[in-house]
Each structure stands twice: as structure tokens, then as C-alpha cells.
Image: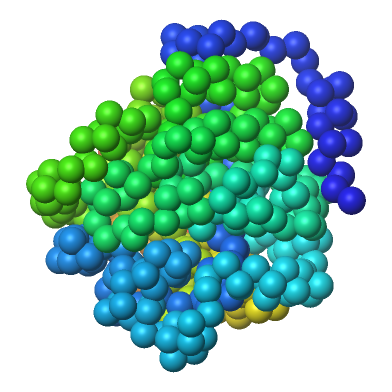
Amino acid sequence: MSEAPAHAAQAAAERPPAPHYEPTLASVRTHPVPDWYEDAKLGIFIHWSLSSVPGFAQRELDIRDVMRTRHRDMAPLSPYAEWYENAAKFPWSPAAKYHRETYGDRPYHAFQADWEAALAQWRPDEWARLFRKTGARYVVLVTKHHDGYCLWPTAVANPHRPGFASARDVVGELAAAVRAEGMRFGVYYSGGLDWTFNPTPIRSAGDMVASVPGGDYPDYADRHVRELIERYEPAVLWNDIAWPTSRARLWSLFADYYDAVPDGVVNDRWLTLLGLGRILRFTPLRAVFDWLYARTIRGGGGALEPPLPPHCDARTPEYTVYPEAREKKWECVRGMDRSFGFNRTSVESDFLSREDLVRSFVDIVSKNGNLLLNVGPRGEDAQIPEPQLRRLEWLGAWLERNGEAIYGTRPWKRAEGRTSDGLSVRFTSRGRDLFALVFGTPAGPEVVLQDVAVPPGTVVEWLGVGPVAARADGGSVHVARPDGLGDDPVHAIALRGGA
């Protein structure tokens, strides 16, 4: 049985009185980004639904390549395995070919039996311990993806596919396990797409916007999210694609969420697209929209960033890192390979290397971001694949030595720099302490941090090694390179009192 209701009662009893939010945009905009989210830096995303049973997507093109060069076929050629049901609807797609050869004419919804049978091997406590050891401070579970399958025993019946929900409370069990390990728990919900309500195949970005269901779906989605809030009090309320109700109903939902979870976080994918969706039902207009969308992606260097909604606590660019620090809190969301859902065709070269994983994480943190790193478990046995486990281990080992330069920090006056011998540097700060994170292992007897002025009395230390001699020289700091520095992709120098 889920421990989530007991947690909710305890949390409510311990929580101090919070401001009451009115169901207006002006009121919800007064909600501050909570300190815990600013401090956390690392979260774990989990895409694990029926699509993880076939676990297939083309892997030759990443998402940016598809959007730049094949934007009219964006969805059937997506490298995201969680889009399998939609991709397989196009007879010419790689997913359709795989489905015919592997499953014949078996319908997608039949994978429910396989996925639920595999829950006998699922150990949520083991997952939670693994995520804590990785260094994550919060976990966000996909509770319903675009296929419409729910990972909790919802009381909100699906009128188009009865019983399309797990009888086992996967959401509640994982919430309890995550919180027992001292982490925050959040929920993802696909508000913009539900293929049990609108099964029309999606080919392009314009098709996607036009596919946001109407009719009885807005009430269904609103009731679902309110149920998730009431049962599990999620620390993060993470919506995807769009939101199907009016803005007035959305402000009411946000106000009620913030009243229930004052230190909660909402992401930026709640844009209400009712008007645009109606316009794009006219097929000729979609071609224009798709062309403009592809041109935006090309012109933006491949940045996948949702449109800015009237209100959010954090931005969520996808497989994207900004070139500079941002004032608005943001969260990079990405898989370890080219997919969020498990893709059994991925090979080692598709995954982030140890160097790229650690360096991109440091870069994100220096620019006021969090990393929401995705895990895609297998559907046939409810296990996390070994290539993903290895990368979680890499990140955890690095954070164990260098976490002081990450957790609870804020951007410094600039994010980037270089040493005198050309190594890239990222900066973070906490109070009067400055942290310089050096990409690569210095070859010489010292590291010279350029354009870094520190006050007298600054104590300098290589994290994981210990204090070293250092001297200021004009606008630079000369830091002795210690023995035993190791081969970490990034080495952190603490200048205590140096900010």
C-alpha cells in the first residue's frame, strides 16, 4: 500500500502557514522559486511506460538533426522511443517495420500486460538508493505519457480505454521510497497529448499542436492532475507539450497547487494553445507553421526550448545548454543517449561519455541551471540498463569528491573563464566562497586562473585533495598543482573567502 497519504498528512502538519494564492495570474506570479530547487542542481527523470516494452526508435539522427532536416517527418523519425506508438502508425517508419517484424499485428495497448507483469521484479527502494548515491536531490516520474497509460490506480476513469492504468500504485511506492532517502519527489504529466483521446497520427510540429484533445479531455486532465496533487503532494509539477484548459482554469490549478505545496515548482510547458490548435486544424496552415518552426530551430543553433508561458518557476530546454548564465532558473532535461524512453538499439557511442556528462553538468550549474538527467528502464523486467547505471555511478563518484562546488551554489559574476594554458573554467559561488571548476587535468606545476582577483587571506583548496599554496598576481591567481590529482574530467578549486 502506498505511504503517500501518510506522508501528505505529516507534511501538512509540519509545514508552516503559507500565503493563500488566488486563482489569478497576478497571484500565482508572486510564488517564489523555492530555495531547495535552487540548491538541488541534480534531479532524475524517469520515462518508463508501455513503450519501454518494445523499446525501439531510430538512432541514426538525434532530435536536433530530425527537426533541422526532416521537420515534416519529425514524429515518425523521432529518436525518442517513448513516441513508439505514434511512429508505428506510419507504415514506412523504422518503428512500423520493427513492429511488423517483431510483433506482427499486436496492438500497442496489449503491452500493458507485459509491463505490469514485469512489476514483480521492480524494487523501488533500490532505485531510490541508487538515485541518492548518484547525488540527485529530486526525482520526477512520468505518471502518464502521451500513450495515456497511468502509473497509478486513478479514480478518474478513461472513457475511451477503460482500465488503462496500473492497479499497483507505482507513483505512490516510488514517492515513498524517494522521500525515505531524503530526496524530493515530483510528477510529470502529459497534458498536451493523450492518444487514447485523439489517436490521429502526428507527423510534424503543426500536427502535434493541432492534436491537443478537446471535448471531455480538458476536464479529464484537470481532474487527473488534481488527483496527483491531493494523493502525492509532488514537489515538482511537470507538464509536457501544452495544457488543454482555459487560462482561467490553469491559474486556479496553480493556485490550489501552491496552497497545497507552497515550496512546489511548476515548469514552463503549460502554454494553453486552444486558439492556435483550432487554426492548425486547417492542414495547409500546418505546412507554414512547420517551416517557421524548423527555421527557428536552425537559427537558434538547435536549441529546443518551449515557448515562454505567462507563468512558470523554471524553464526546461531539452538537450540544450545555454551559452551564458540565465537570470531565470532553468533545468536542462535530457536522456543519457538520444532517447528518454529505453531504446534497445542504442550503442555505446550514442551515450554521453564520462567527460561530456560531468562537463555538461558543471556548465549547466554555472549558468543557473539544474540537470534533470533521464533514466529509461526496460519494460520487460523493470530494470535500469547497465549503460545508464554506469553513468549514474560516474556522476555520483565525481559529486562525492566535488559536490561542495555544486550544491547550494549560485552563479558568480561570470560563468566561464580560462586558465593561462587554455583550459576551460566554470565558476560557482556560495557566500564569500568562490569555486573554479577546471576542465581537464593541468600539466604544469601550477594553474593560473585569469581575471580572478581575491582578497588577502583567501584559503585555496583542491576539493578531494586538500589545501595548497596560492598567490595573487595582479588580476590572476596562481594555484599550485598537487600530487594525486587523478583523472577527473573536471577538478574543483575552492577559494574560501575569494568571492
- Counting labels gives 0
Residue 419 visible in the current orientation = no
Q: In the image, 376: left or right of 299?
A: right
Q: Which residue is painted at 35% across and 47% down in the image?
A: 211
Q: In the image, 1: left or right of 482?
A: right
- Looking at the picture, how far across and down is residue 227, in whole percent? 69, 34
- Looking at the picture, how far across and down is residue 421, in whole percent? 26, 63
Residue 198 visible in the current orientation = yes
Q: Quadrant of residue 131?
A: bottom right
Above or below for 217 versus 15? below
Q: Which residue is painted at 57% across and 67% down in the image?
A: 109
Above or below for 378 versus 237? below
- Looking at the picture, how far across and down is residue 244, in whole percent? 43, 34
- Quadrant occupied by the C terminus: top left
Q: Quadrant of residue 308?
A: top left
Closer-to-camera residue (191/304): 191
Above or below for 223 versus 67? above
- Looking at the picture, how far across and down is residue 313, in whole percent? 47, 29
Q: Quadrant of residue 476?
A: top left
Residue sticking out furthest to the bottom: 101
Q: Which residue is painted at 53% across and 26% down in the image?
A: 33
Closer-to-camera residue (281/432): 281
Q: Which residue is painted at 42% across and 21% down in the image?
A: 247
